[in-house]
Image (tube, rainbow, N blue to C red):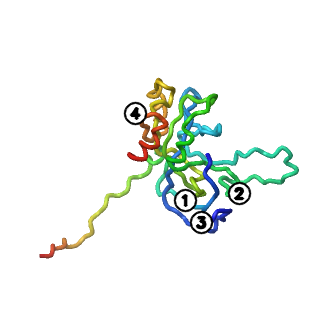
Amino acid sequence: MTAGAPSASQAPDLAGTIEAWRIWRVVAKDGEYRLCSALKPTVWPHDVELRAECLHPEPAFRWLRRRERHGAPNPKCECGIYAAGLEQIGLYLTPAPAEPALARVLGRVSLWGTVIECERGFRASHAYPASIYVPLDACGRNGDGCEEVAESLEAYGVPVELLRTRAASAPDLLARHV
Amino acid sequence: MEIGKPKRIYRVEPLRDPLPSKREREPAAPPAVAPAGPKPVPAR
């Protein structure tokens, strides 16, 4: 197997979904808490699946570069819904200082549709959370508000679990028990 | 998230709806029925 730009015609078909891990920010929207992508402003709906679209910014001089819009994920772009292994997402558990989020949680996500397997993770066209874990310090150092966040995230209809460990230790704990 | 270069593309079809809200509305699978015929006699 080589890196590069594979074509869809080479793709083997899989029945079921691919499950991997990711980090979400928790944001307030319409009076409720919602999952939001960690690096993009994409709020995950709780009643339908999230469908990927290319959020790559248009070039400043678009007329100079005729880049056509494409479906996501595209192997030649960086678009798609990202997920990876526990060891990989652990690098992103520390929130940025000015990040607008009520909390930062992690969980498993189901991926389907077009899924690009990359060297250390996946990019998919369709995704929905499969389980959500709220670390002890997800909502700040003392954990105030974590129960409220966890309760609100139950709107996604998947298991939501409060962890008895801090975010930094969560990947190790989950690797042993999930 | 840095996940490296693409290796392979899959076309993934869910066996059942991944959305819990829709899964609950799916008809339940019929119960498994044992095939008709005499019961096998355990070998001695």
Residue A167 seen in render: yes
Quarter of the view holding residue A117: bottom right
Q: Chain of mark 4?
A: A
**Residue at image point 42% right, 40% down:** A159
Name the residue beneath numbered marker 1: B12
Look at mark 3 in the image and give the residue it sits on: A11
Judging by the rendered image, the residue that carries numbered circle 2 is: A76
Q: Nearer the viewer, residue A22 or A70?
A: A22
Disc number for residue B35: none
The CA distance from mark 4 to mark 2 is 41 Å
- B38 lies above or below A92: below
Residue B35's place in the image compared with B5, above or below, is below
Q: Amino acid at mark 3?
A: Ala
Q: Earlier in the sequence, mark 2 or mark 3?
A: 3
Residue at image position (62%, 68%) is A10
**Circles 3 and 4 on the same chain:** yes
Label 4 amino acid?
A: Arg
Residue ID for mark 4: A164
A37 above or below A6?
above
Q: Earlier in the sequence, mark 4 or mark 2?
A: 2
Residue at x-position 41% and y-position 42%:
A173
Q: CA distance from mark 3 to mark 1?
A: 10 Å
Q: CA distance from mark 3 to mark 4?
A: 41 Å
Q: CA distance from mark 1 to mark 2?
A: 20 Å
For the N terminus of chain A, the quadrant is bottom right
Q: Chain of mark 3?
A: A
Task: Give the percent coordinates (x, y) of residue A98.
Answer: 64, 28
**Spatial separation of the CA atoms under disc 4 and disc 1:** 35 Å
- Cα separation, mark 2 vs mark 3, equals 16 Å
